[in-house]
Amino acid sequence: MNWDDTGPDIDQRLVDSGSDGEDQAVEAALRPKDLDEFVGQEKVREQLDLVLRAARARGATADHVLLSGAPGLGKTTLSMIIAAEMNAPIRITSGPAIQHAGDLAAILSSLQEGEVLFLDEIHRMSRPAEEMLYMAMEDFRVDVIVGKGPGATAIPLELPPFTLVGATTRAGLLPPPLRDRFGFTGHMEFYEPAELERVIHRSARLLDLEIDAEGAAEIAGRSRGTPRIANRLLRRVRDYAQVKADGVINRDIAAAALKVYEVDARGLDRLDRAVLGALLKLFGGGPVGLSTLAVAVGEERETVEEVAEPFLVREGLLARTPRGRVATPAAWAHLGLVPPRQGNGGNGQTGLFGT
């Protein structure tokens, strides 16, 4: 319900927080239309509500807004809510699509007064366009360069007041001059299971599905704290319930469906378990280098590092150390394995966690 960007170019995983064509179509129907409907992110919602109420009371355009956080947490949804709350149209584009300053100038010059410009993955915008954006955000003006060399002329172009909503999964990559020009910055946190249960119940109502509290809790617990994943899992459980049962989703049906799709009780899928399994069974829990681990599971280094590792680290199942990747005691317990008396495959060195 509240969600958002894709990772490395690999086959879509059921627990991938990026979105594909099917997700985008369903998201359009499930997205909340105002802040009251939006589930979770209580602090961001409260702060953003104050910003928008104050702007409406002044009859002014809302301050520029920067939303940061992992994919799938609701950045795109909040940008649409901002436009709806301000009763303004919204223009949607992305950083990778703006490779030249002229691309940005064309978009800015066509904005209407008060319009919301949503710029997804803003940290991936080209540097020339980024520098043009500084003046546009602060002075509502851009200088269009005509000609080249000594004969080049800068033509100032006045812009109507607008609200820029920038979204990024890597706020640290934004240069300080750009960050400082946003009037409001909100960081999106991962959702608690109880919040995801509310998301699932709301989505089930909109999809005309019958689901009980235990079924929603089972799906929420495997959703990695991400609403987009929760909605995707709900749709797959719906398919299973319609084919294998009477269409009603309960705990048993949800667990059986997600077992078919290889999503375990903690939200790990085949790739996650393959990484952990190789680390534990082949390398005695580590430490082991990333490239070696990637070869062991038959994946690219970038896939292991950017797709599997973030969740495993966040769950406390894997640690990144200067010497390599190391499994934690929780990883041994999760896969039902007994750690060796000595770490590192019996080479006599003590592991990071004393295994």
Image (tube, rainbow, N blue to C red):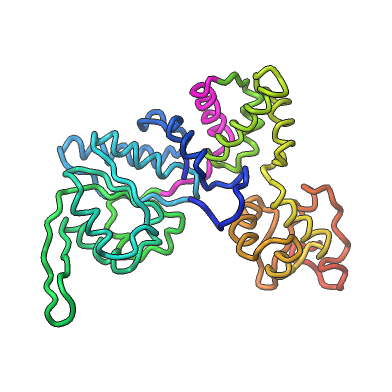
Horizontal relation, residue 142 to residue 293: left or right: left
Horizontal relation, residue 41 to residue 217: left or right: left
Q: Residue furthest bottom?
A: 150
- Does 33 sit above or below residue 127? above
Q: Main secondary structure of the magenta part?
A: helix
Quadrant placement of the C terminus: bottom right
Q: Nearer the viewer, residue 353 or 118?
A: 118
Horizontal relation, residue 64 to residue 74: left or right: left
Q: Nearer the viewer, residue 171 or 352?
A: 171
Which region is colored magenta?
Answer: 187-208
Q: Residue at x 28, y 48 (%)?
A: 117
Q: Quadrant of residue 236?
A: top right
Q: Residue at x 43, y 34 (%)?
A: 28
Q: Residue at x 34, y 50 (%)?
A: 93
Q: Residue at x 52, y 48 (%)?
A: 18
Relative image position of residue 222 (x, y in whole percent):
65, 38
Q: How many marks?
A: 0
Relative image position of residue 34 (x, y in whole percent):
35, 31
| In magenta stretch: residue 207 | yes
- Does 273 sit above or below residue 283? above
Q: Nearer the viewer, residue 348 or 301?
A: 301
Q: Nearer the viewer, residue 19 or 326?
A: 19
